[in-house]
Amino acid sequence: MPDIYHFEDFEPGQVFELGSVTATKDQIIEFAEEFDPQPFHLDEEAGKASMLGRLAASGWHTGSMVMRLLAINLLNKSTGQGSPGIDELKWQSPVYPGDTLTAKAEVLASKELRSKPDLGIVTFRITATNQNQKQVMFWENPILFLKREAAP
């Protein structure tokens, strides 16, 4: 395992374990109050009355928790230069207070960029499962990385 991941270190099929995080009731409500104030993310009774069946995390909160794992356990240990966007994002199952999410990143493809010879682009599929191994979300997106010879 390199100290810092460069474009050349990523190969299709490679999987990076990103660790786990547990969603708490207080965090779910706090996130929702600021960013997604829908009743079923803010109140237990409203959650029970919704199709979610109880208080549930916003999908954006779920994505943010997983993004933190991706940043801490892979991107901050790389020459990552950002992403041009997300190609696909699906919230597949609600996340409830007390759920522990485990995330991983799989390399789907990598490609050198002709227009920017110091960079390559790596496409990842990021997945998160709960403590019952039920997949709760995934996204696919390309991320830009410096090539080894271009890194400072």
Image: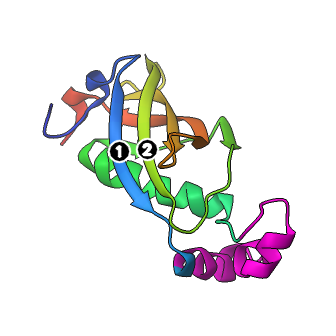
Q: Is residue 39 above or below residue 4?
A: below
Q: Indicate the amino acid at tag 1.
A: Leu
Q: Main secondary structure of the magenta part?
A: helix
- Look at the numbered disc 1 and give the secondary structure of its residue: strand
User: Which residues lie in the magenta part?
Assistant: 27-54
Name the residue that disc number 1 marks. Answer: 18
The answer, for residue 16, to whether it is visible in the render is yes
- Graded by Cα atoms within 10 Å as few (under 14), some (14 to 19) or many (20 or more), the crowding at tag 2 reads many
Which of disc 2 and disc 1 is earlier in sequence?
1
Side of 122 where 52 appears, left or right: right
Residue at the spot x=26%, y=24% of the render? 9
Find the distance from the CA under tag 1 to the CA under tag 2: 5 Å
Residue at 24% from the left image edge and 35% from the top image edge: 5
Q: Quadrant of the C terminus?
A: top left
Disc 2 is placed on an element classified as: strand
x 50%, y 66%: residue = 98
Q: Is residue 52 left or right of residue 114?
A: right
Q: Amino acid at mark 2?
A: Ala
Along the viewing direction, whichever of 46 and 80 lies nearer the viewer: 46
Dot 1 surroundings within 10 Å: few (below 14), some, or many (20 or more)?
many
Q: Position of residue 77 (x, y in %)?
A: 24, 46
Residue 63 position in % (x across, y down): 57, 55
* Residue 103: assigned label: 2
Q: Nearer the viewer, residue 110 or 58?
A: 58
Q: How many marks?
A: 2
> 134 above or below 121?
below
Q: Give the label on residue 145, or none.
A: none
Quadrant for the N terminus, please.
Answer: top left
Picture residue at 58% right of the left edge, 58% below the top: 62
- 96 versus 28 height, above or below: above
| Pointer 1 with pointer 2, Cβ within 8 A | yes
